[in-house]
Image (cartoon, rainbow, N blue to C red):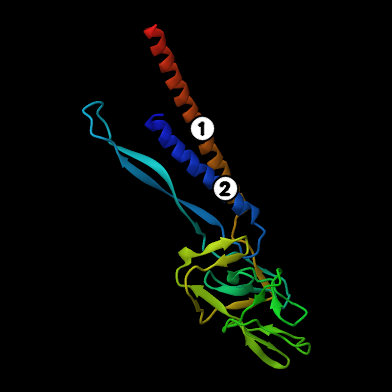
């Protein structure tokens, strides 16, 4: 297999990965707080041995799937009037919930009360306060309000303060499903989180843009496949001619 085919195959593998990422984005277009992933490509350069003939460029540029990253743009807010639906206005900050695998970050702010009075998400994972403890209410706390700084109160007074954190390095965040993120770096409290009560942050995925991106990825994948097939046919034809001359 010659260099043109190998280079094209590197592009084919990267393009296949790009389509997987776009498909994941589309699948989570309706997931609250979801942030779209983007691909980062780069060239991987290899030097050919110096030859007198044929002349030409001695550097081969392969396509490298360098990394994926999260689109930090916040999603639109949907107002629900549910007092335990919470959204973070702006791109910065994350809620923290306690999961069986430890604390995780989330922007999916649809919360509710469980049987013990704890504020939990749809998977019964407790919302944590600024000290990393679950927020607990009592049966007499019937009118809950959340201030912009995260202070949770009822008609009986202040209950606690919702913890909103920011990882030191957002590039190290890894997704665990569509809702949860693992920080993979230390986090620090956000001084002014700007929480909006009675609202949910929708996914920042734009379905039409993602569909357009998928169609472009598919055309490039098909073009690369045709190039590899054409190169294979060219090599087969050359071998057949050489064999016939040899006979």
Position of residue 110 measured from the top left corner of the image (x, y, whole percent): 69, 71
The C terminus: image quadrant: top left
The CA span between labels 2 and 1 is: 17 Å
Position of residue 133 measured from the top left corner of the image (x, y, whole percent): 61, 82
Left or right of 150 on screen, residue 64: left
Q: Which residue lies furthest to the top in this view?
A: 247
The vertical placement of 30 against 107, above or below, is above
Classify residue 147 by image quadrant: bottom right
Left or right of 189 on screen, residue 4: left
Q: How crowded is mark 1: few (under 14 residues within 10 Å), some or many (20 or more)?
A: some
Q: Mark 1 points at which residue?
A: 225
Q: Residue furthest left?
A: 52
Q: How crowded is mark 2: few (under 14 residues within 10 Å), some or many (20 or more)?
A: few
Q: Which label was assigned to residue 20? A: 2
Q: Which label was assigned to residue 198? A: none
Name the residue: 36% across, 45% down: 44
Of labels 2 and 1, earlier in sequence is 2
Position of residue 184 measured from the top left corner of the image (x, y, whole percent): 49, 68
Q: Disc 1 on helix, strand or loop?
A: helix
Name the residue: 52% across, 37% down: 221
Name the residue: 26% across, 35% down: 49
Name the residue: 41% across, 36% down: 7
Depth check: 88 or 237 in front? 237
């Amino acid at each position: 297999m010659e260099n043109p085919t190998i280079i094209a195959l590197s592009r084919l593998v990267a393009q296949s990965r790009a389509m997987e990422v776009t498909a994941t984005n589309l699948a989570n277009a309706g997931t609250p707080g979801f942030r779209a992933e983007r691909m980062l490509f780069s060239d991987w350069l290899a030097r050919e041995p110096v030859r007198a003939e044929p002349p030409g460029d001695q550097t081969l540029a392969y396509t490298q799937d360098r990394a994926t990253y999260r689109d930090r743009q916040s999603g639109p807010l949907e107002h629900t009037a549910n007092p335990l639906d919470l959204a973070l206005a702006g791109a910065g900050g994350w809620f923290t919930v306690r999961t069986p695998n430890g604390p995780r970050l989330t922007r999916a702010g649809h919360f509710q009360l469980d049987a013990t009075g704890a504020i939990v998400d749809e998977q019964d994972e407790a919302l944590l306060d600024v000290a990393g403890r679950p927020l607990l209410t009592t049966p007499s706390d019937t009118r809950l309000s959340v201030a912009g700084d995260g202070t949770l109160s009822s008609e009986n007074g202040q209950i606690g303060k919702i913890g909103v954190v920011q990882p030191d390095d957002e590039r190290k965040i890894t997704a665990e499903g569509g809702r949860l993120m693992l920080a993979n770096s230390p986090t620090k409290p956000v001084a002014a989180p700007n929480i909006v009560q009675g609202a949910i942050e929708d996914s920042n995925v734009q379905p039409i843009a993602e569909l357009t991106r998928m169609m472009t990825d598919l055309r490039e994948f098909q073009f690369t496949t045709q190039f590899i097939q054409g190169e294979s046919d060219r090599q087969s034809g050359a071998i057949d001619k050489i064999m016939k001359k040899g006979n």
